[in-house]
Image: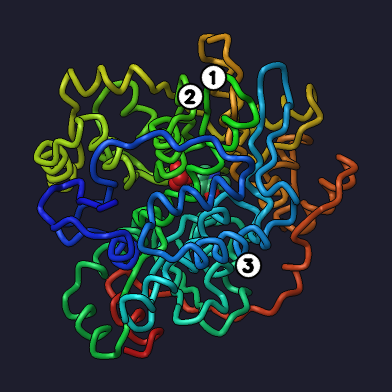
Amino acid sequence: MKYVSTRGQAPAVDSLQALLHGLAPDGGLYVPQGALEPLPPQADYRSTMVSLLARFFPEMEAKAREAAVASSLARFRSAEAVPLKAVAPGVHFLELFHGPTYAFKDVALTLLPHLLSYAAQARNAGEVCVLTATSGDTGSAAMEGFAGVPGTRVLTFYPQVGTSEIQRRQMVCCQGENVAACAIAGNFDDAQAAVKAAFADPALAERARAHGSLLSSANSINIGRLFPQICYYLECARKLAQPFDVVVPTGNFGNLLAAYFAKLLGAPIGRFTVASNANRVVCDFIQSGTYNARRDFHVTNSPSMDILVSSNVERLLWLLTGGDCAQVRAWEEQLKAEGAFTLTPAALEALHRDFASGWATPEETERAIADLWQRFGYLADPHTAIGWKVLQELPATGRPTVIAATASPWKFPATMLRALTGSAPADDFAAARALGELTGQTPELLALESAPIRFSQVTAKAAVPETIAASFGF
Ligand SMILES: *Cc1c(COP(=O)(O)O)cnc(C)c1O
């Protein structure tokens, strides 16, 4: 299995190289070369993970693959790491939030560090210094996932405005000698753009090399983030044993892309639905075929989807055009230069064969939370509730639907309480206690309230390369 760039101007590389470098040297994203054969059904989730790794990371030794999967699964609170809950008629919630930071990012980020650590050792790449931009959930998941993994370090940039208090504390209180977090004066797109620019900065790369280190990424541009996520859709296929649709709360498009890959690997998924918040750039793209990032950025009550530049759409473009790298490159160049591009009619038709989309305002998000609680006694976090809202507006297909439940409600207690009662205290922890009393459920994550704060630095966008060099000691 080789990996090629979506933009077609970089050499094909093996899986360890793709893992270590994250972004291809031509600015594209790595994708597996050639057609994908269906993965034979496995006995359980663990064996699905192991056989998927064997397929996509063949350079890794079998023993190391087994050990990486075991380490990842050991971090989950639920015996079934990713339980599928039947909540409403024909609607299942795939709970992806039983890992260390209570969001679906844990599924990939409890595994990726072991893959990277292995790749770095096998290739004598030195210390892997991972840079991450986060809208709220990736940062803490990366820090928890990499903490204590030999030969790795992590620096996370998070937006100064937009994350919830609990999300922020999960980062700034995270323990682990090899992890750090820094606020960036700006929003998520600023953080992501600054990290992307750091990867493209030859001076910084040279300083890393001189230090015996390699800069890498834990964002969903890294192919090692994508593959663990495919496994839970294959697991749904195993459990449901019939064709189904998926609805996925979408930001950077990594999770939905994983579902699409699961279909290419044999999962009988019918309709793929993008559920967006008020930053509905991908939702509009699916409907109109025009990707237009020239719009106002909204800070919403589903902060992990507050994104206007959705990196993994590039991989979808590559798949939709049958691997037409020149076309993907032209679109991406147009996006960079003009802030927008439009699909060809043929590509739009291919998109509409499989994809639907919808979105919710913050008020609609709260109404969806209340609806799920009042009718089904199910507490869905704001991101997941948008999936429910969007599903209600789609034509029925007769197939069961799996909604990806991407975060725990206890990560966003103020929004949850406001949705159920009309008001909430400004303090997340007070809100969590009140929500516990109201619902009779046990609040989680309260220990963060008294956890010591380790990181309080705020950096300007322009100072990011210096901050990186100082943090990693280059
Ligand atoms: C990251 C995240 C999303 C968006 O996932 P993408 O793969 O970026 O589309 C949705 N919900 C939650 C809770 C998240 O943390």
Residue at (86% x, 40% y) in the render: 439
The CA span between labels 2 and 1 is 6 Å
Residue at (34% x, 17% y) in the render: 353
Counting residues from the start of the chain, the first of labels 1 and 3 encountered is 3
Quarter of the image where the C terminus is located: bottom left
Residue at numbered disc 2: 269
The spot of residue 339 in percent (x, y) is: 20, 42
The spot of residue 66 in percent (x, y) is: 56, 61
Q: Are marks 2 and 3 in contact (CB under 8 Å)?
A: no
- Image quarter for residue 333? top left
Residue at (41% x, 62% y) in the render: 218
Q: Is residue 164 positioned above or below 234 on the image? A: below
Q: Is residue 249 positioned above or below 429 on the image? A: above
Left or right placement of residue 283 versus residue 432 in this view: left
Q: Are marks 2 and 1 in contact (CB under 8 Å)?
A: yes
Residue at numbered disc 1: 243
Left or right placement of residue 427 versus residue 30 in this view: right
- Image quarter for residue 464? bottom left
Residue at (48% x, 28% y) in the render: 359
Viewer-nearest of labels 2 and 3?
2
Residue at numbered disc 3: 169
Viewer-nearest residue: 323 or 199: 323
Tell me which amino acid carries mark 1.
Pro
Tell me which amino acid carries mark 2.
Ile
Counting residues from the start of the chain, the first of labels 2 and 3 encountered is 3
